[in-house]
Image (spheres, rainbow, N blue to C red):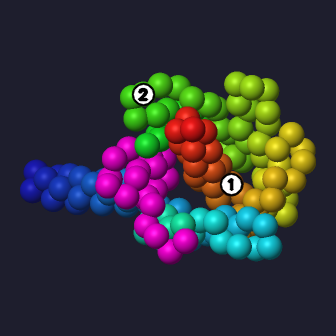
Amino acid sequence: MKKLLVASIALFQFFISCQEKSEKQNIPAFEIKGENDVVFMEIKEDGTIYSNNNLIGKFENQNTLKDKNDNVILTLKDGFLYDAKDNKLVAIDSNGKINNSSGNTLRWDENGELLNDEKKSGFKISPVKQQLFRPASILLYSYLHIHLTNQ
């Protein structure tokens, strides 16, 4: 009985430590660059996001984008982006491809360049890794969505 209790406790601790690691999992560091390789946004390994060396937000658990005041801006659930009020905004597939409501398609090509309806947009990602395409799309969508709705 004592062995069973010890084994149960060890299994429970293992489960909890695995769950904590997956919840704290973040994305690798990367940059989104614009024209002439100017860094537009820089994402650090801890998920913090900088633009022009100013902290502008943070990725949390690879699925939640927060502003610098720790307020939720966007959340990715089941392949869809939702705003802070839980309104469904747009679908983003695992490769970062976005089909928006106006019929435009945004996607990253194999060279890490963002294409808007198959035309180069001037944005690219560095390093070029498929796992970074979705978070980069979330960032660019948030930037465009916020700036277009505030005009």
Q: Picture quarter containing residue 30?
A: bottom right
Q: Taking the image as drawn, is residue 23 in sight?
A: yes
Q: Please say if 32 is above or below 146.
A: below
Q: Please say if 148 is above or below 21.
A: above
Q: Please say if 82 is above or below 124.
A: above
Which residue type does callout 2 highlight? Asp
Disc 1 is placed on an element classified as helix
Q: Is residue 118 magenta?
A: no
Q: Is residue 57 left or right of residue 107?
A: left
Disc 2 is placed on an element classified as loop
**In the rendering, at what x and y percent does residue 113 appear?**
81, 59
Checking the image for residue 86, the label placed there is 2
List the residue tagged with mark 1: 133
Which residue type does callout 1 highlight? Phe
Q: Is residue 137 left or right of residue 111?
A: left
Distance (Cα) linking label 2 and label 1:
23 Å
**Front-most of residues 106 and 35:** 35
Q: Residue at x 24, y 53 (%)?
A: 12
Q: Residue at x 69, y 46 (%)?
A: 96
Task: Specify the farthest residue to the right.
Answer: 119
Range drawn in magenta: 52-72
The mark lying in front, picked from 2 and 1, is: 2
Q: Residue at x 45, y 61 (%)?
A: 56
Q: Are marks 2 and 1 in contact (CB under 8 Å)?
A: no
**In the rendering, at what x and y percent does residue 20 appear?**
32, 57
